[in-house]
Amino acid sequence: MIPEQNIIQLAELLASDDKASMATLSTPIDCFDDANNPNVVKVVNDDNKNALYFSRSMIPFDRDGKIQSVNELQQYLQRHIGIYAYRAGFLKRFASWPPSVLEKLEQLEQLRVLQRGFTVKIEQAGLIPPAGIDTKEDVARVVKFLQDRDD
């Protein structure tokens, strides 16, 4: 259900940096429920569009409770969109590695890449895609959407 525009954006992002092994996209988190939902993967990045960490917990953690509005939430918190672009040679290497310690803890395969010191490029999606399909409830939502579209 990811828009074609995002797939093109992702390919261009990977092509823009010869040092990057893979690339992915994010979008601002726009509700407090998502910020605390472990099924919504969060990501933080550096100023050079490199992912620093992915988590099922709220990152960055709002220790002092400064985030009071949805606008502030969107400014600080990013939802990872579960789409990746890989360089072909890197994908073969990645597939041969056993799961890392961080990957096992968070149940997030992209942490295997970061833990080994490789670069994951990331930027905000140009077009916000629909929410991910991670739970039985999500599958039901998508089935309903497709049925309604066909009517």
Image (cartoon, rainbow, N blue to C red):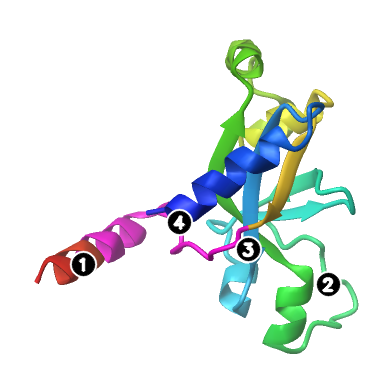
Which residues lie in the magenta part?
125-144
Q: Secondary structure at mark 2?
A: loop
Crowd band around label 4 with a 10 angstrom C-alpha radius: few (<14), some (14–19), many (20+):
some
User: Earlier along the polypeptide chain: callout 1 or callout 3?
Assistant: 3
Q: Residue at x 64, y 13 (%)?
A: 89
Image vertical order of residue 145 relative to residue 93, above or below: below
Quarter placement of the N terminus:
bottom left
45, 112: nearer the viewer: 45
Residue at which label 3 appears = 27
Crowd band around label 2 with a 10 angstrom C-alpha radius: few (<14), some (14–19), many (20+):
few
In the picture, measured across the screen, residue 1 lies left or right of residue 10, that is left
> Which label is found at residue 144?
1
Q: Is residue 140 in the magenta section?
A: yes
Image vertical order of residue 132 relative to residue 86, above or below: below
User: Earlier along the polypeptide chain: callout 2 or callout 1?
Assistant: 2
> Which label is found at residue 62?
2
Q: Residue at x 78, y 54 (%)?
A: 44
**Amino acid tagged 1:** Lys
Quarter placement of the C terminus:
bottom left
Gap between marks 3 and 4 measured at Cα: 12 Å
Residue at which label 4 appears = 132
**Amino acid tagged 3:** Thr
Q: Secondary structure at mark 1?
A: helix
User: Earlier along the polypeptide chain: callout 4 or callout 1?
Assistant: 4
Crowd band around label 1 with a 10 angstrom C-alpha radius: few (<14), some (14–19), many (20+):
few
